[in-house]
Amino acid sequence: MKLLDIFAKLKGDMSRIEQELERSISFGDELLSETSLHLLKAGGKRLRPVFVLLAGKFGQYDLDKLTKVAVPLELIHMSSLVHDDVIDDASTRRGQLTVKSKWDNRIAMYTGDYIFGRALTIATELEDPFIHQMLSKSLVQMSIGEMEQIRYFFNTEQSIRDYLLRIRRKTALLIAISCQLGAAAAGADRVTVNRLYRYGYNVGMTFQIRDDMLDLFGTEKQIGKPPGSDIRQGNITLPVILALKDEKVREPLLEQIRIIREHNGNVDTKPAISLIKSSKGIQLADQLANDYTKKALAALKGLPGIGAKKNLTDIAHFVGKRNY
Amino acid sequence: MKLLDIFAKLKGDMSRIEQELERSISFGDELLSETSLHLLKAGGKRLRPVFVLLAGKFGQYDLDKLTKVAVPLELIHMSSLVHDDVIDDASTRRGQLTVKSKWDNRIAMYTGDYIFGRALTIATELEDPFIHQMLSKSLVQMSIGEMEQIRYFFNTEQSIRDYLLRIRRKTALLIAISCQLGAAAAGADRVTVNRLYRYGYNVGMTFQIRDDMLDLFGTEKQIGKPPGSDIRQGNITLPVILALKDEKVREPLLEQIRIIREHNGNVDTKPAISLIKSSKGIQLADQLANDYTKKALAALKGLPGIGAKKNLTDIAHFVGKRNY
């Protein structure tokens, strides 16, 4: 089941955004357009544009204006993915070759810079300083989040709080801002804007926790890249942190992580994954993800009962159970 | 002789900008502040802030406002340098270790992203959409320029025009925008703003041509890194393009470039540099640089005869003779 099936009504508007995404990066240097288009065509759930459009329903829905918010947000997301791939050893994402492995690291880096620049250029057409402020804030926070991820590589002493702060910056903030700016661009009142921000933040936290669980427990078909890629590069995610708190699992898991580190990730991660699966970590991670879903739903409570509210509720449930 | 000696009068305002530069990057993650500060302390001529301040003298000079333009411009320049170093094999810049060699490539990449994000965050405080537009445009153009540099690596058939278009994007545009936004932020009239843009553009072109000449003909002490680093990584600059047009030099130079390429740059570049030196290329490159200097001076003609005009004239001459 694809996320888009939930809101068939948005399809027309989403294809307009898809067109604009394509147009926005077909500009300038041939190679940059080619690498950017490759990245775009590799797919993705377009979660951020969907949130912009749905949040826009809580004000004066203006597709032109919302497109100019949705496109930069998706481009910022894409540019962070391509920079992620530079440091990540995985050669595929969503089942497609990454820019880094199809071309090279330098090209992937400048593709990210270019896409980010195009994102801002489109956003500045709106002439709303608040939107520019939030977008630049998101870049700062995302790069801090990415840097902290690197700093905490193979750090087996990190706390749940370290992890949550990191995914807040890396993922939740941009989704929160998508909901916030969609509502703001539609001229929704401040209370509504803040509720949608809170909704997006909590859905984003659930999303990343589920994503990190999938990376360990999903199949290559489900996730479009080999499972265990996080732990292989040293990215210690929530299920691992929680499993390390399980006395029965802690010592053998530390040993497995030591082996992975010693071989720079070029070893079988199945023993580590089995240990994590056998620990109490899974249930606890599940519970934490569910708590964020509940908070997301609670944030929607005071909003008017329009169709978009139902859609956002469905998405929260969907993301909460994410196993696609 | 340092550039700053030319305009001792700006020293107070420049130290305010230096303070703000430092403050602007001491924010968030410890490691990011450390890498960014390392980059800042490694020096640099602060040419872009100087242009902002001098251009600001042609309107209502407001240091607060000009600082909020100058700091982002210098940060954008810094972020492009650190991304440059990721792809460049040189391990020093300005005689200091690069972020990439002191830490690593991933850290250098996120340091660039972070500094760029901070640049925009500070710029958005000004709430002037025109400034945001020009800054995002500069990022797009700079990444196109960098990408084209990579695409033209070891391309010995490229034209002078290919080279000029590239350095226009890579360097001249940001200097032009520095002059333009300094004047615009000071509320100067449109004709003045355009004149200063043209001045900056032409000075920027001269600057990059001189920089590329220095990379070949300077000493390690002068340029803070080993000479020949451009040709070593395949970056074919103006003196090389011109030398390849010299019948006496063409064949042996092509052979040297082939050897450099075959050994991934790990060979002595002295034979290639001697060949370029012996060609007619140097005089032609010199002449082209001088032509741009003349255009820069011509752009200043209609401006009022204030002290800043004299300073800009001096800088154009200085950059034109650049051999520091």
Image (cartoon, coloured by chain):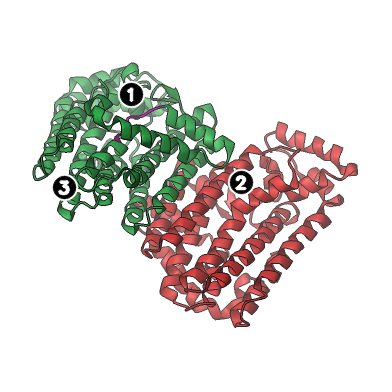
Chain colours: A red, B green
Quadrant in the picture for residue A220? bottom right
- Name the residue at 54% across, 37% down: B32
Badge 3 element: helix
Badge 1 sits on which subunit? B
Magenta region, main secondary structure: loop
Badge 2 sits on which subunit? A
Distance CA(mark 1)–CA(mark 2): 35 Å
Task: Give the percent coordinates (x, y) of residue B50.
Answer: 28, 36
Up the image or down, A300 lies above or below B146; here it is below
Distance CA(mark 3)–CA(mark 2): 50 Å
Residue bounds of the magenta highlight: B43-47
Q: Are marks 3 and 2 in contact (CB under 8 Å)?
A: no
Distance CA(mark 3)–CA(mark 1): 35 Å
Under mark 3, the amino acid is Arg
Label 1: which residue? B228
Query: Does A284 sit left or right of B31 as displayed?
Result: right
- Name the residue at 66% across, 49% down: A165
Viewer-side residue, B308 vs B233? B308
Q: Would you say residue A50 sits in the magenta stretch?
A: no
Query: Does A30 sit left or right of A80 as displayed?
Result: left
Label 3: which residue? B195
> Is residue B254 visible to the viewer in this orientation of the structure?
yes
Under mark 1, the amino acid is Gly
Badge 2 element: loop
Outermost residue toward the bottom in this view: A306
> Is residue A98 visible to the viewer in this orientation of the structure?
no
Label 2: which residue? A90
Position of the C terminus of chain B by quadrant: top left
